[in-house]
Image: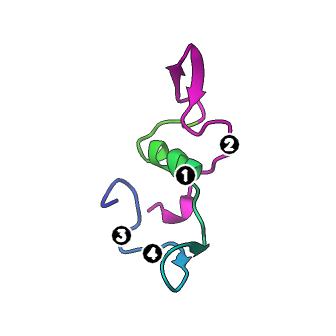
Amino acid sequence: MAGGGVRQGFVYGNTDELGCEAVENKVSVTDWHATIPHLLGLDYQRLVFDQNGLKEKLTSVFEARVVKEILA
């Protein structure tokens, strides 16, 4: 994520000893899907697409947050 408003040289969170699972500062897929449009200047809550005649949100029905700790 070089450029684009993400802090340079920054590590966010920790994994277990084997690197298999996040143990500190976990970021869900929906959080990630909210953060990327935010960096592009889009409102992830209003961003919808048509699927089978329904208006679907990128973050689905799950509650999402912008991970502001990684932003520059």
Return the residue found at the far left.
2
Picture coordinates of residue 16, whole percent (x, y): 55, 81
| Among numbered discs 2 and 4, the one appearing first in the sequence | 4
Q: Give the spatial CA distance, label 3 vs label 1.
A: 22 Å
Q: Is residue 33 above or below residue 27?
A: above
| Mark 1 to mark 2 CA distance (whole Å) | 10 Å
What residue would you read off at disc 3?
A: 8
- SS assignment at label 3: loop
Secondary structure of the residue carrying tag 4 is: loop
Sequence order check, earlier mark of 1 and 2? 1
**Cβ atoms at labels 3 and 1 below 8 Å apart:** no
The residue tagged 4 is 11
With respect to residue 2, does 9 lie above or below? Answer: below
Quarter occupied by residue 24:
bottom right
Q: Residue at x 58, y 56 (%)?
A: 28
First in residue order: circle 3 vs circle 1: 3
Circle on res. 29: 1
How far is disc 2 from disc 4 in space, using C-alphas? 26 Å
User: Which label sits on residue 62?
Assistant: 2
Q: Along the horizontal axis of the image, is 7 left or right of 44?
A: left
Tell which tag, 2 or 4, sits nearer the viewer.
2
> Mark 3, mark 2: which one is toward the viewer?
2
**Label 4 crowding class (10 Å Cα cut-off): few <14, some 14-19, many 20+?**
few
Quick one: label 3 or label 2, which is nearer the N terminus?
3
**Which amino acid is tagged 3?**
Gln
- For the residue pair 2 and 25, the one nearer the viewer reads as 25
Q: Which residues are magenta?
A: 45-72
Q: What residue is shown at x 62% (from left), y 50% (from top)?
A: 65
